[in-house]
Each structure stands twice: as C-alpha cells, then as structure tokens.
Amino acid sequence: MKINFTLNGKSAEIDADPMAMALDVIRDLDLTGTKEGCGVGVCGACTIMVDGEPVSSCICVVGTLQDREVWTVEGISEKMPDLIEKFIDNEGMQCGICTPGQIMAAAAISSVDITSEEDIKKYMAGNLCRCTGYQTILNAVEDYLAIN
Ligand code: FES
Ligand code: FES
C-alpha cells in the first residue's frame, strides 16, 4: 500500500505493508537513529514524533502514519540543534541506546506546559535508561527549557 506523509519536514511516499511497524519501516529508510529497545512499547527507545506527540514506533503500524507529520531524531537534530547541544553539554548519554528516544521526548515536551523538575520527570517517565543516567538527562532537558 502507498502511504503518504511528511517525514522530517519533507513529503514522503513509501510502499509498505500498512501493518508493518513504523520502527522497521523508518530504519529501512536508513533513518537508523531510531532504536529498538524492548520492542513492546515499554522503554521509549523507539520514540518518534507524530503530529507533535511522542509515539513508540515499535507498536505503531505504519498505515496509521498516512497524512501525518512525522519526525525522527535525524530531523529533530537539524530542526532543534540547541536541544542536541544541551544533551552533549550535560553528557546526557552513556551507551546511547535510549538517547534518541530521550531527545524525541524532550523535543515534544517543548510544546507542553512544564514548570518544574517534577513535571519533566512525569512527562519523560516512559523513556527508560538502562544505564540509569537519569540525572544528566534531566539536567539536559532542564537546561534546554531553562527552568532550573
Ligand atoms: S522499543 Fe519501542 S518502546 Fe521500547
Ligand atoms: S544511555 Fe544507555 S540506556 Fe540510556
């Protein structure tokens, strides 16, 4: 089935099984920044942004992306370089597997009313870090939002 959507700010058309997982389809497009962690919608490593909302691409069938606006970490890196810089400045990564998902969640957080560290923690609770580098990730997001 032909699926048309906007991908990282550009029109895209792919020919795919509509029931294929968006994670696999996106990675097959050489956008391998999106990682698979748990594969069952629990860890957030595979987070992409769909119409401004963070979505776990490992449990999102690609047919649902028809006519939607989709961003991956590659596009967000170009669109929001300040956010990436804050992750680097704060060393908000260790092994890096969760990092793209953390960045995508943080990118989506910008459009939500966040006023405290607790708000950030609650919003990003779905993004797990098996290296347990939560404090530096939190510092990076706080720094980006400048609420600390
Ligand atoms: S890989 Fe998708 S939520 Fe864990
Ligand atoms: S940096 Fe390793 S899982 Fe988060």
Image (cartoon, rainbow, N blue to C red):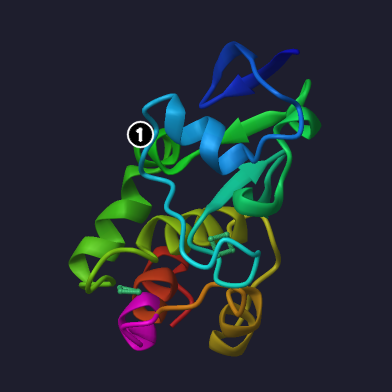
Picture residue at 62% right of the left edge, 38% below the top: 22
* Residue 88 relative to residue 15: left or right: left
Q: Along the line of sight, which residue is nearer the eye, 58 or 102?
A: 58
Picture residue at 33% right of the left edge, 50% below the top: 82
The percent coordinates of residue 60 (x first, y second) are 71, 46
Quadrant containing the C terminus in the rendered view: bottom left
Q: Residues within 10 Å of mark 1 (few under 14, many from 20)?
A: few
The percent coordinates of residue 65 (x first, y second) are 74, 30
Report which residue position mark 1 lands on: 78
Rendering quarter of residue 99: bottom left
* Residue 111 relative to residue 117: left or right: right
Which segment did they paint magenta?
130-137
Q: Along the line of sight, which residue is nearer the eye, 70 or 39?
A: 39
* Residue 58 relative to residue 96: left or right: right
* Residue 65 relative to residue 106: left or right: right
Rendering quarter of residue 73: top left
- Say if the magenta span includes residue 133: yes
Name the amino acid, label 1. Answer: Glu
Rendering quarter of residue 25: top right
The percent coordinates of residue 21 (x first, y second) are 65, 41
Give above or below for 47 relative to 93.
above
Q: In the structure shown, which secondary structural element does the residue marked by tag 1 occupy?
A: helix
Q: Along the line of sight, which residue is nearer the eye, 44 or 16?
A: 16
Q: Along the line of sight, which residue is nearer the eye, 48 or 146?
A: 48
Picture residue at 32% right of the left edge, 44% below the top: 81
Give above or below for 39 relative to 117.
above
Which quarter holds ligand 1?
A: bottom right
